[in-house]
Amino acid sequence: MIVVMVVVVVVKIGGGKGIDYELFLQDFANYKNTILVHGGSHELDKISKKLDKPPLILKSDNGSTSRFTDRETMEIFNMVLCRKKQQIKATLLNL
């Protein structure tokens, strides 16, 4: 019996402002068996505000924060991430 183990690395790139995606993707393209997860919070906040649906951030007693996501926010989130996915795909195709 032959057992083959494949290691998959999951990389989460934050959605915050100031990330150089082109530089990151040039480096990321060199790795095999990787999955890219993207946050998108900065872009979601920006687009939400333009659509008159500013983010509602909840803060717990211990200081943790999280976004309240209703149906409308989820639709905006999907729109933003689909757009980001297309931009990342285009960058990868041009490497």
Image (tube, helix red, strand yellow):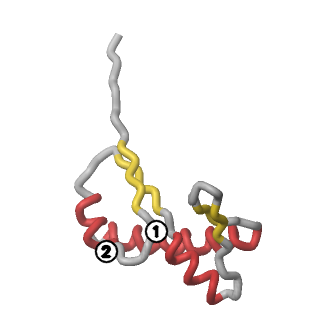
- Label 1 secondary element: loop
Residue 93, image x, y percentages? 33, 68
Residue 23 picture quarter = bottom left
Residue drawn at the location 62% of the way across and 89% of the way down: 50
Question: Pointer 1 and pointer 2: residues touching (CB < 8 Å)?
Answer: no
- Residue 57 lies, with reference to residue 36, above or below; the image says below
Residue 62, image x, y percentages? 59, 55
- Relative to the observer, which residue lies in front, 16 or 28? 16
Residue drawn at the location 69% of the way across and 67% of the way down: 74
Q: Which residue is mark 1?
A: 15
Q: Of callouts 1 and 2, which one flags the residue occurring earlier in the amino acid sequence?
A: 1
Residue occupying the far front of the picture = 61
Residue occupying the far top of the picture = 1
Residue 21, image x, y percentages? 34, 72
Q: Which residue is mark 2?
A: 20
- Label at residue 77: none
Q: Amino acid at mark 1?
A: Gly
- Relative to the observer, which residue lies in front, 43 or 61? 61
- Residue 54 lies, with reference to residue 82, above or below; the image says below
- Answer few, some or many: residues within 10 Å of disc 2's Cα (few below 14, many 20 plus, some between 14 and 19): few
Residue 60, image x, y percentages? 64, 58
Q: CA distance from mark 1 to mark 2?
A: 11 Å
Residue drawn at the location 70% of the way across and 82% of the way down: 53
Residue drawn at the location 65% of the way across and 76% of the way down: 55
- Answer few, some or many: residues within 10 Å of disc 1's Cα (few below 14, many 20 plus, some between 14 and 19): some
**Left or right, 30 with reference to 13:** left
